[in-house]
Amino acid sequence: MRDAEPKAIHLSDYRPPAWLVDKVDLDFSLHPSQTRVTSKLSLRRNPAGAPGAPVVLDGDGLTLVRLAIDGKPLAGPSFEATPDRLTLAHPPADAFVLEIETLVDPTANTQLMGLYRTSSNYCTQCEPEGFRRITYYPDRPDVLSVFTTRVEADEAEAPVLLGNGNLVESGKVDGTSRHYAVWHDPWPKPSYLFALVGGRLAKISDSFLTRSGREVELGIYVEHGKEARAGYAMDALKRSMRWDEEAFGREYDLDVFNIVAVSDFNMGAMENKGLNVFNDKYVLATPETATDADYSGIEGVIAHEYFHNWTGNRITCRDWFQLCLKEGLTVFRDQEFSSDERSRPVKRIADVRALKAAQFTEDQGPLAHPVRPETYREINNFYTATVYEKGAEVVRMLKTLLGEAGFRAGMDLYFERHDGEAATIEDFVASFADATGRDLSQFALWYAQSGTPVLTVSGAWDAEAGTYRLDVAQEVPPTPGQPTKKPMLIPLALGLVGPDGRDRPLALGNTPVENGVVEVSEARQSFLFTGLDARPVPSLNRGFSAPVNLVSDLTEQDRVFLAAHDADPFNRFDAIQRIALEMLKTGARTGSLPATEALVTAARAILADTTLDAAFKAQALALPGEGEVARELAKDVDPDAVFAARKALRLAVGTALEGAFATTYAAMAATGPFSPDAASAGRRALRNLSLDFLAVTGSAEGIARAKAQFEAADNMTDRITALAVLTQHEVPEREAALQAFYDRFERDALVIDKWFTLQAQIAAPGTLERIKDLMLHPAFSLGNPNRVRSLVGAFAATNPTQFNRADGAGHEFVTDVVLTLDGKNPQVAARLLASFKTFRQLEPVRRASAERALRKVAETPGLSPDVADIATRALG
Ligand code: 0A1
Ligand code: ZN
């Protein structure tokens, strides 16, 4: 266990490392409970470090066996070793080889950080600070070293032995049942990118020829029997490799690229150099077991980890405050890849939906922090939507401001200047400023100021002058540690839509507006658009050009108009969503829905529009979620009222458009064999949306249709959506279908996760008891992060009425699980606890119950730093 009350670490305290590691030779002798790790560090005093500094190496729960310097054993007072630190107060020279032997127990490692076991295989997770659980090391990202790794194991237990880089040697260990492999990674890297895998694994192989002619051997390793499920991931990998060459000029740099799928993993996947380790959820897919969302998740995560090879690995982070340097940029890159592979507008809509659900919510609550935080107690708690998703938005805005060519020039300069280095956000921003000559100092506030800016916009039409004036005010709300803010540089893409539905040319005075983007840089600003023949309707923040909350004076009628005519597909989507959202807010506040004709009219027009693709229609017609309504209400939220309003609106739309949905349901039926491509997925999405609206009344016909689809489905998307429809209704078909689903997939853990999630999401008072029972189900395990997330995590994050039950039982249950889990896996426990981040927006009774539950956690002795940090900040 680490220090229970870790100190705050501040960006301003950064100092260069006192010692560097020129190379490191590692030797692992794998054993289930006593793995021997020998590490030879070629240490050299850093001329830029503090003069005369001792050697201080990080550890975390380590058992030291032996130490030697330049081959000579070291004893007694010349060093000090605790489980968490190794200190040589008087290093013998300015350069020497330190040999360290430690013993680690991978089977006892339930935190899944460092070396651990999963399905009896060995694997590692070192980002951010897991390497120190393997051996003593300067475990910080600005110490880059060349790693050579020898892995030895019993051949029957671990026939496959993998490491970073290229395989240089392998063989049997004479006279024993053991064998070994030696891997060498020529690219200097920080310890967090180290990885090793050993076990009984099956391999699917392929190859890729880079544009300069390097033949790369590709391997995906999975549990035996699952080989046939890795084909889509392999295809996504090859497409990613090609795309990075074409879109960013980045080529792969080793002879081997391996991916290993494991079933116990704290996060999605990890970009270890040449040896990515994946949560198997993001590798394995067949039409029968994976939904369209799973397929696109796999494509996105495979791309993300691959793209890290340049943004993260070749150029890494100087310190963990710079996490967004690799994460925000790499999310931007994977989003762009998926946009090019699929439908760009639909991808943008899905990304913005996810951004608002996760990041806007985070920004609005007690866990808000800047894209680049300036202080932390537990870095594991900063792998957040803000660092990742808002980080990507900041890169996207940079591209909007600089244009395609300017952005590419900045990226090229960044790669040229910093390849092989550990860089900072300042380095990144300077590359764009220098490549384009633009002053980006105000723009850089996006990295430093937390909170979602509110942009308030109103328009004034002057018929005589033919001008339209937009008055814009911006304000960034106060957030923890940041009571006041400066105005930001906000790229606002917009259009002025004439009465005929066409965009008018944009000109400020006599100057045409380039790319339709104006730059908002002051607290208050006006833009006078000239040369207009009629009063326009403004289409604001097109493509969601800036991650802001927009408050405008558009009327419901303007929105119906935009939903039907806006040339920007994102804003057509946004217009109809905004119409629905306003109705839902009123419904939740007052207990009765306002007139719903405007939404019905807009929805009918969208359904009937033959120029729109199915995926877009499905997104536009999916009503805003309960979470989004709650976030918009912002205070005194009663989740039951939100649920009731949403149900009433679903009923209103479903009833009014029953005929259109029935036609759509029939028209969107599959015409051929299953394919996971975007167009086919879009048809399924629209068909399943129709299924849901058609069953909203709970009519016998609607339920029968869902049941029939559930039984006849030839793919998981159709089957699980039908099951989801059935579970929302208290009908006998529900339990029968749940049982049938379980019987069909009981041996498939990833599918059983979906079964857990659907039950955790039932918005009815029996759900909590159901979940408690399911925790005793043989398929459930607190030790497996996917199981915990699919049942308890899904409950806390996506079942607002039951999690926030007025009697407090939901809050109490989740915090009890957090406390039990904390002893096993603090990272997963802390993430689960973070679902309380919105508790202050609840009405007083529920707010008090959440606060009580959080206090109980905060006051529990012996908490992990991870959970203690979330509890303290959430209450803060
Ligand atoms: N760098 C990974 C995220 C990651 C972070 C921590 C982990 O350990 C628990 C694992 C993965 C990514 O962005 O994909
Ligand atoms: Zn990443």
Image (cartoon, rainbow, N blue to C red):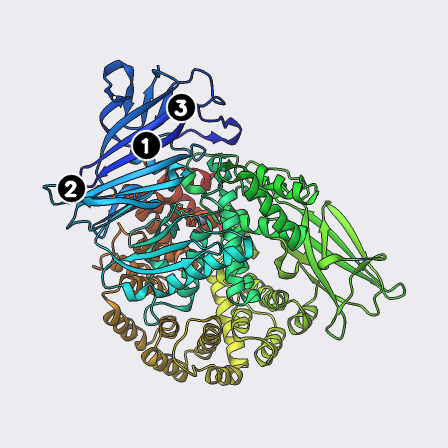
Lower position in the chain sequence, tag 2 or tag 1: 1
The location of residue 20, given as percent across then percent down, is 41, 27
Q: Is residue 600 left or right of residue 643?
A: right
Of residue 671 and residue 634, the one placed in the foreground of this image is 671
Q: Please say if the residues under marks 1 and 3 sit with CB atoms less than 8 Å apart.
A: no
- Residue at numbered disc 2: 173
Q: Nearer the viewer, residue 548 or 253?
A: 253
* First reached walking from the N terminus: tag 1 or tag 3: 1
What amino acid is labelled 1 in the image?
A: Arg
Amino acid type, residue under disc 2 in the picture = Val
**595 sits to left or right of 27:** right
| Displayed quadrant of residue 522 | top right
Q: In the rendered image, which residue does mark 1 sit on? A: 2
The residue tagged 3 is 44
Residue placed most toward the observer, 95 or 168: 168
Which circle, 2 or 1, is nearer the viewer? 2
CA distance for labels 3 and 2: 33 Å
From the top left corner, tell me how far across and down residue 148 is, in percent: 32, 38
Which quadrant is the N terminus positioned in?
A: top left
Left or right placement of residue 852 versus residue 170 in this view: right
